[in-house]
Amino acid sequence: MTDNSSPTAASRRSFLRTAAFAGAGLATGAAQAQTPKPDPAITEVPDWTRYLGPGVQNAPYGSPSKFEKHIIRQDVEWLTASRESSVNFTPLHALDGVITPSGLCFERHHSGVAEVDPAKHRLMIHGLVDKPLVFTMEDLKRFPGRINHAYFLECAANSGMEWRGAQLNGCQFTHGMIHNVWYHGLPLKTLLDEAGVKPKGKWLLAEGADSAAMTRSIPMEKALKDCMVAWGMNGEALRPEQGYPLRLVVPGWEGNMWVKWLRRLEVGDEPWEQREETSKYTDLLADGRARRFTWIMDAKSVVTSPSPQAPLVQKGPNVITGIAWSGRGRMQRIDVTIDGGKNWTTARLDGPNMPLSMVRFYLDFDWDGREMLIQSRAMDETGYVQPTKEELRKVRGVNSIYHNNGIQTWLVRSNGETENVEIS
Amino acid sequence: MTDNSSPTAASRRSFLRTAAFAGAGLATGAAQAQTPKPDPAITEVPDWTRYLGPGVQNAPYGSPSKFEKHIIRQDVEWLTASRESSVNFTPLHALDGVITPSGLCFERHHSGVAEVDPAKHRLMIHGLVDKPLVFTMEDLKRFPGRINHAYFLECAANSGMEWRGAQLNGCQFTHGMIHNVWYHGLPLKTLLDEAGVKPKGKWLLAEGADSAAMTRSIPMEKALKDCMVAWGMNGEALRPEQGYPLRLVVPGWEGNMWVKWLRRLEVGDEPWEQREETSKYTDLLADGRARRFTWIMDAKSVVTSPSPQAPLVQKGPNVITGIAWSGRGRMQRIDVTIDGGKNWTTARLDGPNMPLSMVRFYLDFDWDGREMLIQSRAMDETGYVQPTKEELRKVRGVNSIYHNNGIQTWLVRSNGETENVEIS
């Protein structure tokens, strides 16, 4: 935590200097001073200015431009046994701001996407309650106390391949099991209060309506604190891959607990020890013991550009940008280094800084064309500082799959190409 | 401004009372106490629990559930001469929170959707500047000082048909020429500073690359205050209908000024008096004179549910919800009436309350099945209170098309059906 001076003033001066491409030769029709040939983008009238474009259409649900077709969710075919239990990763390298577009939100399924008819969907609350309840979707939507929150959802296995060294070449694949969206629904507490949790009711089992019947145990304290039952995301209905028509929202905790296609909440007096909290979603240590109930996602960050899928294309002014998040509260500060950790500069945050939600950071800088080792390091409001991968391995060994929040390193070569590397 | 007491406690008690449908007969398999017949949604295992769903796919850009196919942008065929100069309205009745999904954002074109190749797109800044500039998209994206803001964009003609009385039956059509999204880009001031505006440069002409070459004059004071040049919306690239790859953002001002497919910014010493600011986007008064340069969108609100497209379906607990916005700053308060203005209750705001951005309000209430006249009334931080349509007509006559921010009335009939009406 050394040099916090802002590079912005210097960058601006330099932009003026290097931005000779812009304008100097304009009067003669040459867009770039270095290029005497006229820029056809200026001298020729393009088709979209010459001809009428398509008009509005009936039944439209809009889509991205045809020039953005490469910005998509992608899977890694060898990662899982079948497509029904696989992952599509968010293209983080191409996004900005803090809210993930619904069409690009990562997806992870245990038995494919359940295509649930909302008219036939029910949410049951039972077990150690005064009054078991069954809700239709209509019942939930007319229940008092609706709320809206933006939260990050990170799969516990995000960056899991990186435990054993740099593996995947692109932040879409190293960090793309995360999204950050608005949720619309009810506080879970509201529904539990309606049912009346008995004094012995210290745990909650959440069950999905998919054919995996995904089940997780959640401590009642968390359930009453800030969990939500949500039917909406980013303004509209949940997407099928995110649990349409109803999902559990467990802010700051690992994504596997955010049960999708939520159909059942059972109140009990101890955890259920389901498959997804015993053989899976526990952390095998070097000595053979396993950590369990490691629910909270610790502070983490990643530079999304430059990155292997978003290389640098030009010397001079450039923007380093990335995202950070913490399951323990609000983000305090993100530092960035371009020399592998010798010098750190505090990045500028821009956009909302909401607790348990992504933040966006920027560092404007001048690139002189030298190789760089770029890293970011997050610190949350509790004072927790994102560790290096080596620091994590010392404590947790290399058997783990889950909860890798280590600092990511990108090597930017002098030609701008960028790689996933590890430095010791 | 009378009764501000919260109806929430009463509603909650009533929900318990009327919510006998939920749970009482659960042990015997009957979901609804009123219905002795078992609910097949509980007693039968649905297909989505019995069979694997589809797995993740290559090249996916996600879409809404097939059960949400009716939630779309829609046009009104008779409204304009051609589809290329028409409007698709946002389905406000089906949305929640404050951010409009990009696929559902209203669109209005003057010569169709320009399908611009970003590699061939340029932004020129010229006129009364020290140094004319031409930027490629890559240049803009590596320029220092990138920012993110959520702003509402309302067409000046939103609710225009309502000047002469209740016309369109649904808030999608009466109020749907608005969206509220995140923008990612640069402060316009940054680019103007780079070019160096000469002291005489008091106006800016913004021009689009579509075949209408849409042009509007913008006072320099506004341009330097908070305008943006944006290439991103809601986390990803702008959509074609919203000006891909570059648009002007003019916070709080009428949507027509937010020039899409932005290709040219000319600095001058007086307004250009273009078609879109003389024969259009001026307000013809009763005495034949016209108001012009009426840029700011005044405080406005509308109840989105219940509304003609979202009728009430059941007595008992229900949620009134809607949106409000003001081009003059932050929203202060929204009041709601269910008796045509005799009694007003201050609604609960939930979600972010950002200046020049939509807010979401809720009023939980018990419906006894009587006819209601529902209205909402916005007040912004300047103290400005949304007027009635009659108050507007007294000042502005009925020749106007633009800037109708009058209070909207929905008549809810005893069967729950809801209509657009006017009361005097």
Image (cartoon, coloured by chain):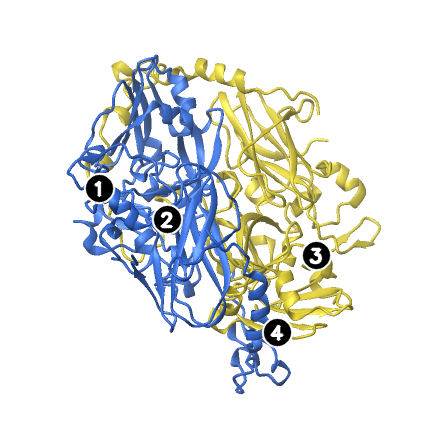
Chain colours: A yellow, B blue
| In-front residue for pair A373/B187 | B187
Q: Do labels 1 and 2 share a chain?
A: yes
For this view, does A391 lie left or right of residue B358? right
Q: Position of residue A61 (x, y in %)?
A: 36, 54
Residue under circle 4?
Answer: A133
Q: Which one is closest to the eye, mark 2 or mark 4?
A: 4
Residue under circle 1?
Answer: B111
Residue plotted at (64% across, 45% down): A159
The residue tagged with tag 4: helix, strand or loop?
strand
Q: Label 2 sits on what residue type? A: Cys
Q: Do labels 4 and 3 share a chain?
A: yes
Q: In which quarter of the image is the C terminus of chain A?
A: top right
How much space separates mark 2 and mark 4, taking CA atoms? 37 Å
Residue sticking out furthest to the right: A287
Q: Are marks 2 and 3 on the same chain?
A: no
Q: Which one is closest to the eye, mark 4 or mark 1?
A: 4
Residue B333 visible in this rendered orientation of the protein: yes
How much space separates mark 4 and mark 3, taking CA atoms? 21 Å
Q: Between disc 1 and disc 2, whose residue precedes?
A: 2
Cβ–Cβ below 8 Å for labels 4 and 3? no
Label of residue B105 in the image: 2
How much space separates mark 4 and mark 1, taking CA atoms? 55 Å
Instruction: Name the chain letter of the residue that bears numbered label 2.
Output: B
How much space separates mark 1 and mark 3, taking CA atoms? 54 Å
The residue tagged with tag 1: helix, strand or loop?
loop
Instruction: Name the chain letter of the residue that bears numbered label 1.
Output: B
Residue plotted at (32% across, 39% down): B255
Q: Label 4 sits on what residue type? A: Leu
Residue under circle 3?
Answer: A222
Q: Do labels 1 and 3 share a chain?
A: no
How much space separates mark 2 and mark 3, taking CA atoms? 36 Å
Residue plotted at (23% across, 41% down): B110
